Image (cartoon, helix red, strand yellow):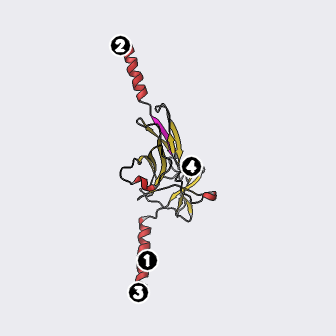
């Protein structure tokens, strides 16, 4: 009898250890996009806020569309559940240079319910932004419909995959000038205005 009880406890523990999981990340090369031009993340002109990160965002249950304002509304269920600090591969194999490092990771959640919807966004150091397509006719288009909804009768075995590139290997995030660059620009503007008044 003790053996059966022990086996039942072990089976319960093994079952509780499983969780629904989401494999997510960037994938492909990272370009910084300022709304007009795109620069490969490894170029010397490419700058991004040191506090930037890629975020896996839980949007709610069975979500079909969303906007960035949904992340800040009171009472919203949208929240960042996992993140990857901004880091780009600059050495090693040429095929890896310019990619987000690490390119991906897995988020596990034992409490995830069937119908959970997720997206991947870029936090630029001060606010969230979409990841942008940088190829073909979609150049500069926000990936605002990049949504993964996980549905499964048995959520302990459920999984899904979502990447910020949305299937494209060429995508970008919004570039943020370094604070010193912005301050120099403001100082130059102030001097220009003062000179015109004189």
Give the magenta range.
Answer: 19-25
Query: In x, y percent, where is residue 19?
Result: 44, 34
Q: Nearer the viewer, mark 2 or mark 4?
A: 4
Q: Secondary structure at mark 3?
A: helix
Q: Is residue 8 above or below residue 24?
A: above
Q: Secondary structure at mark 4?
A: loop
Query: In x, y percent, where is residue 181?
Result: 44, 68
| Alpha-carbon span between mark 4 and mark 3 | 51 Å
Kindly identify which residue carries mark 3. 197
- Residue extending farthest to the top is 1
Say which mark, if any, is on residue 2. 2
Contact flag, marks 1 and 4 (Cβ < 8 Å): no
Query: In x, y percent, where is residue 1?
Result: 36, 11
Kindly identify which residue carries mark 4. 166
Q: Secondary structure at mark 2?
A: helix
The earlier-in-sequence mark between 2 and 3 is 2
Query: In x, y percent, where is residue 27?
Result: 55, 48
**Does the segment drawn in magenta span residue 51?**
no
Quadrant, the C terminus: bottom left
| Alpha-carbon span between mark 1 and mark 2 | 80 Å
Q: Main secondary structure of the magenta part?
A: strand
């Amino acid at each position: 009898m003790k053996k059966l009880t022990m086996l039942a406890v072990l089976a319960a523990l093994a079952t509780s250890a499983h969780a629904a999981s989401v494999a997510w990340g960037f994938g492909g090369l990272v370009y910084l996009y300022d709304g007009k031009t795109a620069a490969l993340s490894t170029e010397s002109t490419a700058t991004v806020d040191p506090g930037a990160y890629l975020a896996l965002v839980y949007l709610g249950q069975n979500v079909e569309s969303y906007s960035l304002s949904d992340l800040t509304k009171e009472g919203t269920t949208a929240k960042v559940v996992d993140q990857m600090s901004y880091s780009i591969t600059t050495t090693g194999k040429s095929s890896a240079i310019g990619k987000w490092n690490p390119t991906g990771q897995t988020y596990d959640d034992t409490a995830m319910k069937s119908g959970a919807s997720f997206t991947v966004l870029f936090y630029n150091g001060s606010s969230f932004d979409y990841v942008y397509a940088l190829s073909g006719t979609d150049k500069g288009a926000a990936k605002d419909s990049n949504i993964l909804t996980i549905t499964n009768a048995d959520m302990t075995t459920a999984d899904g995959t979502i990447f910020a590139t949305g299937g494209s290997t060429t995508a970008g995030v919004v570039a943020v000038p370094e604070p010193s660059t912005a301050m120099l620009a403001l100082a130059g503007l102030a001097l220009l205005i003062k000179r015109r008044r004189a």
